[in-house]
Amino acid sequence: VGSLAGGCSEHGIGAGEYTDVRIAKASVTFSDDCAALADPNHTTTIKQGETVLIYGVSEDTGDKLYLDLGGVVIPGAQQDDGSYKFSAKDTQIDHQGNNTQVTTVTTITVTFAVSGSEYVGKSQTHVDVSCSGTNCNGNSGTCTTTTKFDGVEVEGSDVPDPSPPQNP
């Protein structure tokens, strides 16, 4: 199965289908609660390029979509308005000494709209750190980073074909 001609919005992506998308990512912006991480002396119009893969698989609960960011894979679905939303959460609990626990919850959400073969969207990463116990020392807070992107569906990209090899 190759890339879907015409984009996701016209055909949908079912089990065993995929599409490659080449995106240009803008600079990261920070929410007010973590704006101190941003470098006020740095501005740029240079974007970062990346090829991502969107594919469908069949699972016990029905067909499922995944967004493969080249190391991180996020589950998602097409929304009622035709846009797409992929989201995943990671929770890590660290026990630090006597009676202190630091919990870090990271949520990644990618949303985009498709028009023909063009993609416009954003990726948000929200990190929430909480601490309970006697040795917290201000070890808590939140931060949300946002990266906007534009993209286009591509064929013959450098993303490997996920379908099994065919016998000649």
Image (tube, rainbow, N blue to C red):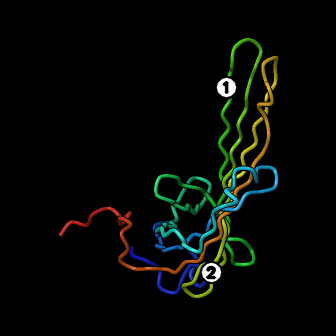
Q: In the rendered image of this protein, does residue 108 appear above or below residue 3?
A: above
Residue at 68%, 38% in the rendered image: 91
Q: Nearer the viewer, mark 2 or mark 1?
A: 1
Residue drawn at (61%, 81%) of the image = 9
Which residue is tagged 2?
114
Return the mark for residue 94. Answer: 1
Estimate the x, y position of residue 92 in percent, counting from the top left: 66, 34
**Residue appearing at x 74%, y 74% in the figure:** 80
Q: Position of residue 58 (x, y in %)?
A: 52, 60
Q: Quadrant of the C terminus?
A: bottom left
Q: Is residue 34 left or right of residue 153?
A: right
Residue shown at 76%/54% (left/top)? 35
- Outermost residue on the front side: it is 41
Q: Position of residue 128 (x, y in %)?
A: 76, 42
Where, by quadrant of the figure, is residue 122 drawn? bottom right
Give the crowd class for mark 2: few <14, some 14-19, many >=20 residues within 10 Å: many
Q: Amino acid at mark 1?
A: Asp
N-terminal of the pair, mark 2 or mark 1, is 1
Q: Is residue 59 shown above or below 47?
A: above
The quadrant in which residue 85 appears is: bottom right
